[in-house]
Amino acid sequence: MADAPRSELEDTEIVTGEPLRRLAEGVWVEPSPRWVRTYLGGVAITDSRRVLLVFEPRRLPVYWFPAADVRMDLLRPGGDTRSARSRVTRYDIQVGDRVARRAAWSLRAPGRERAELKDHLAFVWDRMDAWFEEDDEVFVHARDPYSRVDVLTSSRRVRVEVGGRVLAESTRPRLLFETGLPTRYYLPKQDVDMKLLVPSSSTSRCPYKGLAVYWSVPDGDAVLDDLAWSYPAPIPECPKIENLLSFYNERVDIFVDSVGQPRPVTGWS
């Protein structure tokens, strides 16, 4: 029997209902339907179709794997986080001559709200070589199923200034709305004064958008580093921002339909 269609209200309840209420109160643990693997030195250290996704306030989501789905023969205790009485056990991982120090951890005696994590392990994301959800490689951290990225085409007039200089002005922006972040305005390069920007060597990755490259803005004798970015080849789920340019709202003056936008306070301020 086919699933009945959901109403907008029902979809809203999925995002704003019990899981997020519980998360606001403390730890939220839920089974993930995704097949997840992580590799080190070409070896699958984990390979599991029964991972748990764990949310904690002010932290990124983390995958926890049943010990039975972990190559425990490649792990050895690498010391505890604070002392011999610590609830956390850290593990080194060794594949041939390759050693990833303190790259995994487990809880010796999980409390009530973490009881489901008994006999499970988690891994430090960037100490592993690669992560896969199903057959797609994922970067930076586990994807949050409650986080959305929507890109909408707009005809608003967007102007970007820094120190009174106009860096860009466009009536064909694409607005990117991402859960918990300020609206980002992505502009065609034809509407950006590229003579005022210089390419940066910086790059970053986003699990929802892909690999970003950056531009800086010379400002007299100084340089405003990494003020703008672009995704030359975003992941297939986010094609609308391909090769468009966006500026940090936190560090430039943005005007939308001639109305100045407040500078948000975030980790990029």
Image: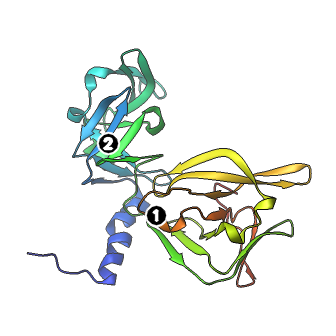
Give amino acid for label 2: Trp
Residue 132: image location, x then y, percent: 34, 44
Q: Residue at x 52, y 70 (%)?
A: 177
Q: Based on the displayed image, in which of its 4 quarters is residue 265 positioned?
A: bottom right
Q: How is the image coloured?
A: rainbow
Residue 83: image location, x then y, percent: 46, 24
Whole-number angstrom distance, CA of label 1 to CA of label 2: 27 Å
* Residue that badge 1 annotates: 238
Dot 1 falls on a residue whose secondary structure is loop
Q: Based on the displayed image, in which of its 4 quarters is residue 171 positioned?
A: bottom right
Q: Which residue sits furthest front? A: 190
Within 10 Å of the Cα at label 1, are there few (<14), some (14-19), or many (20+) other Cα atoms?
Answer: some
Within 10 Å of the Cα at label 2, are there few (<14), some (14-19), or many (20+) other Cα atoms?
Answer: many
* Residue that badge 2 annotates: 64
Left or right, 14 with reference to 182: left
Residue 220 circle label: none
Earlier-in-chain disc, 1 versus 2: 2
